[in-house]
Amino acid sequence: MNKHQNIEERLWDYIDGNSNEAEMSFIKQLIQSNDEWKLKYAELLEVHQMMHIHIELDEPSMRFRQNVMEAIAVNLIAPATKSYINKKIIWGIGFFFITMILGLIIYGFSQINWETTNTNSRFKVDFNKVDWSLFFNNTYTNLFLMINVVLGLMLLDMYLSKKKVEKTQDLS
Amino acid sequence: MSISATDNEIINRILRGEKQLYAELVERYQNFVFTITLRYTKQREDAEEVAQDIFVKAYRSLADFRGDSKFSTWLYTIVTTSCITFLRKKKLETSSLDNERVFELADNQDSGMRANQVEQKSKFAMVNEAIKMLSPDDATIITLFYKGEQSLEEISHVLKLESNTVKVRLHRARQRLKEKMELSFVQEVKDLMD
């Protein structure tokens, strides 16, 4: 960061009131005694005041508020998220995945041959000795996929049922 | 309709069933929401559509407003998220002041100014024209700070950024705005000299 940028950033902090007390009084002194700081401060303060006073907010059309009220007339306030999200389920899912990951790591480490004879390697560990086939074989993969498909179908069913109920309520 | 109740009081009454009071919240924030959407979309029609969607979304999620921040901060979070989603959908080019497109835009605007030399450009117009030349992110951060009555902490919550990052971005945005205004001013003087 060059000197010029540094002065500007410190002055902006001073103008915004983000500096601490020691810095504030130091900058105040600099503004009074140093011409460069004084000029820069006057310049930035003018920009700051212009932005405060002159920035204009645009206005939407006259019918805007009415349009919003018409749009919300057919909408209902959704229940608060915390009312339908069960924290126990979230914690349960988290616990399940952490246990799975930890289990795999522990199993992997227990299978490693730490006494490999390979002298070229800096690490005297043979990762090829880990037998993953116990977990990643056809039976387990198929079972895993099947459970996921069943869960997916259950979720889809729940979603469609909810939509159907909402539609019926809207119509009535 | 204009009532003196605070935003939180109005929201509680809306949640208890006084739906029509939502008009008061719309009245209070419509200009600000519309300005930010316009900064991103650049077209009034699009901005109005996005702003309307924002108020509908905010209404539907009103029960999720916990009151631990200002309603405006919560609303502006929806505004920025919706604007970014809109831009992604439309695949609009978001120009930055650093790229050449903005300078082209500035040139075009300057040509427009030449056509209206008789009209003395006020500071008011200069600031607002310069803001339009900024990137949506820069324009939004300046608008949130100066017109949205949001502190750096609140802006960092709205934009999902670190407070320090917001501070740096605000400094840079102001610097760019200042440069834009100076450029515009120099051009104006040049026009008058010709």
Image (cartoon, rainbow, N blue to C red):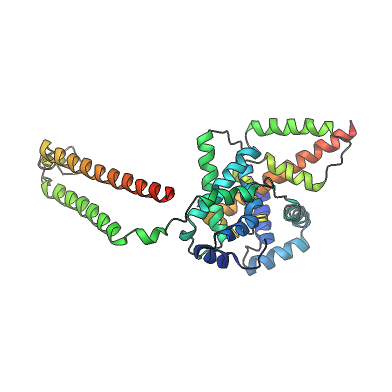
Task: Provide residue A142's location: percent of width, then percent of height.
Answer: 15, 38
Task: Provide residue B105's location: percent of width, then percent of height.
Answer: 70, 32
Q: Residue at x 55, y 43 (%)?
A: B83
With respect to residue B18, does B105 lie above or below? above
- Whether residue A172 is visible: yes
Task: Provide residue A113's location: percent of width, then percent of height.
Answer: 11, 45
**In the foreground, A79 or A41:** A79
**In the foreground, B142 or B63:** B63
- Whether residue B97 is visible: no
Q: Quadrant of the N terminus of chain B?
A: bottom right
Q: Furthest-front residue in view?
A: A172
Judge left or right: residue B91 versus residue A41.
Answer: left
Judge left or right: residue A117 versus residue B105.
Answer: left
User: Hey, which quadrant is residue B186 in on the image?
Assistant: top right
Task: Provide residue B144's location: percent of width, then percent of height.
Answer: 62, 53
Judge left or right: residue B22 versus residue A164.
Answer: right
**In the foreground, B29 or B68:** B29
With respect to residue A87, does B97 lie above or below? above
Tag count: 0
Q: Quadrant of the C terminus of chain B?
A: top right
Q: Residue at x 61, y 42 (%)?
A: B47
Q: Residue at x 62, y 43 (%)?
A: B48
